[in-house]
Image (tube, rainbow, N blue to C red):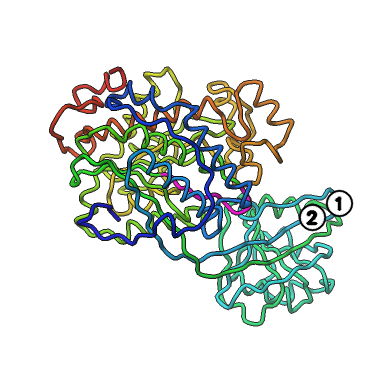
């Protein structure tokens, strides 16, 4: 929700969070950081890295920075303290969410041991009748694989001769997940793995009525399932182990003292990490870049109100931004000129991705992208062009915290340097780095840190031949993108007319008007 006194907001004070905070001393904003040239000089890599070091120290103390855990509360405290020292009056919005502590496992014990990644290679079931917990280690037995029509496991006959006490591997299709899981149990299976259809590496929640199921059951990508199926004599472990309860977490907001509330520019980044990780690139980089921009803009008097947001529980499903948007009135939504999102802006094997607001890549359905988003994309394209940097489209999918905003018609845009997808040969020729490796090889893993602990040493040594890395952060990409964050926020702080047709009074310090597009970042 908006923060002005005329709006309603559920507030939790920083003191009430009660978590320890590692403090850095911000370089306070100069009084005249009111042009793109000035703000990008004020937002430095050193300043951004100070915030990342604080996030790392919090994770070192608490184990991670995941919502619902002490490390996230400490991260909120840190952001609030930094904003207060810079002169803002930050607000903290609390909300409840369904908290899950997932300790599930899918492991090939032998031969060639391999531990599959929860959330990337497999997920536990979420049957309507409950998700039975338990663990089983046993020989893997494929059931009717390959199955041309994917109906293997749909009948008891498919399990003829199945060795009791084994773990069943079944392909999706032909009947409900629950049917296959219950049939496997009836045949004596100690656990069950249902893999996706040929070539499909997406993960879906296994739902349905699985009354009577007591064995652990997981769903795996096609690649994970095929890897298991093609390993003769494999012994595997399947574990379903999780805690679920309702917990409280927080969004943080700060906004400029000056500006038109009826034409508010919002910029946000999610503050939480995944569980058991520091979350330094995902999304310490976006949070830190946004925080340093806010600090350096505190004394700027923009034409339009700028509201900065740090979201909670993004890793649980965009819950912080969803909560915020769901509690806005129609009038409050109408007051939002646009939303900028910064999620992962320093990936070690980076590309410079811009949310594809004009849908030039053709990946979004008609009507999915709000009008004005293309003009936001233009601003970032102009920034990279003026810097002599390459850039490319990033799918406008709603996958990050801009999703709830575009769902209510707010134009949006933002930056992304890549996650689990592999860099192509063509991209490596443009940006450097390692083709065939993920943009972020530590995506959603414990090695997403500043220390380098747990990284693939050989891969990161190759990356270091092209890049300056600090742990899992590409400092060059982060430096460029911190400036891009600051430039775009300041640009729209003074003029949103290219996006929503609203002409702001006063000087357009950011050079955002339509007649000055080519000079936007030269002043």
Q: Secondary structure at mark 2?
A: strand
Q: Which residue is mark 2?
A: 108
* Along the line of sight, the residue nearer the viewer: 480 or 395: 480
Q: Quadrant of the N terminus?
A: bottom left
The segment highlighted magenta reads 269-277
Percent position (x, y) of residue 62? 61, 52
Answer with left or right where residue 33 lies relative to residue 444: left
* Residue at image coords 46%, 60%: 249
Is most of the magenta stretch helix, strand or loop?
loop
Do tag 2 and tag 1 residues touch (Cβ < 8 Å)?
A: yes
* Residue at image coords 35%, 39%: 413
* Residue at image coords 50%, 30%: 478
Task: Tell me if residue 520 comes above or below residue 450 in the rendering.
Answer: above
Answer with left or right where residue 113 lies relative to residue 88: right
Percent position (x, y) of residue 517? 25, 23
* Along the line of sight, the residue nearer the viewer: 81 or 485: 81
Answer with left or right where residue 55 lies relative to residue 169: left
């Amino acid at each position: 929700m908006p923060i002005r006194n005329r709006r309603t907001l559920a507030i939790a004070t920083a003191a009430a969070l009660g978590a320890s905070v590692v403090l850095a001393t911000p370089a306070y904003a100069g009084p005249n950081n009111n042009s793109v040239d000035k703000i990008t000089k004020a937002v430095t890599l050193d300043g951004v890295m100070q915030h990342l070091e604080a996030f790392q120290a919090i994770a070192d103390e608490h184990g991670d920075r995941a919502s619902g855990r002490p490390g996230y509360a400490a991260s909120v405290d840190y952001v609030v303290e930094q904003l207060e020292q810079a002169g803002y009056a930050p607000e903290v919005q609390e909300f409840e969410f369904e908290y899950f502590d997932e300790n599930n496992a899918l492991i090939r014990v032998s031969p060639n041991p391999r531990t599959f990644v929860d959330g990337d290679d497999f997920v536990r079931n979420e049957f309507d009748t409950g998700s039975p917990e338990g663990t089983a280690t046993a020989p893997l037995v494929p059931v009717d694989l390959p199955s041309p029509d994917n109906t293997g496991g749909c009948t008891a006959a498919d399990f003829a001769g199945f060795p009791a006490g084994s773990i069943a591997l079944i392909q999706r299709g032909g009947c409900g997940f629950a049917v296959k899981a219950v049939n496997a149990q009836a045949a004596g299976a100690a656990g069950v793995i249902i893999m996706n259809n040929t070539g499909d590496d997406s993960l879906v929640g296994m739902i349905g009525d699985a009354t009577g199921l007591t064995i652990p059951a997981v769903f795996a990508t096609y690649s994970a399932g095929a890897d298991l199926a093609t390993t003769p004599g494999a012994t595997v472990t399947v574990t379903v182990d999780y805690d679920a309860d309702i917990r409280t977490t927080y969004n943080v907001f700060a906004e400029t003292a000056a500006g038109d509330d009826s034409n508010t520019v919002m910029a946000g980044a999610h503050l939480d990490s995944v569980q058991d990780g520091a979350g330094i690139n995902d999304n310490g980089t976006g949070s830190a870049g946004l925080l340093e921009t806010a600090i350096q803009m505190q004394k700027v008097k923009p034409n339009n109100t700028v509201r900065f947001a740090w979201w909670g529980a993004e890793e649980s499903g965009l819950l912080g931004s969803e909560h915020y948007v769901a509690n806005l009135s129609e009038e409050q939504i109408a007051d939002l000129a646009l939303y900028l999102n910064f999620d992962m802006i320093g990936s070690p094997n980076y590309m410079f991705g811009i949310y594809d607001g004009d849908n030039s890549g053709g990946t979004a359905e008609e009507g999915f992208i709000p009008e004005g988003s293309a003009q936001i994309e233009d601003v970032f394209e102009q920034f990279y062009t003026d810097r002599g940097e390459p850039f490319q489209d990033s799918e406008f999918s709603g996958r990050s915290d801009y999703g709830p905003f575009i769902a209510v018609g707010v134009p949006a845009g933002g930056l992304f340097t890549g996650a689990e997808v592999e860099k192509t040969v063509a991209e490596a020729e443009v940006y450097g780095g390692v083709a065939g490796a993920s943009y972020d090889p530590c995506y959603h893993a414990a090695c997403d840190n500043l220390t380098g602990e747990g990284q693939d040493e050989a891969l990161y040594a190759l990356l270091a031949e092209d890049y300056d890395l600090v742990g899992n952060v590409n400092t060059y990409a982060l430096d460029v993108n911190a400036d891009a964050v600051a430039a775009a926020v300041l640009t729209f702080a003074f003029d949103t007319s290219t996006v929503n047709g609203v002409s702001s009074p006063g000087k357009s310090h950011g050079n955002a008007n339509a007649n000055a597009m080519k000079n936007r970042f030269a002043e």
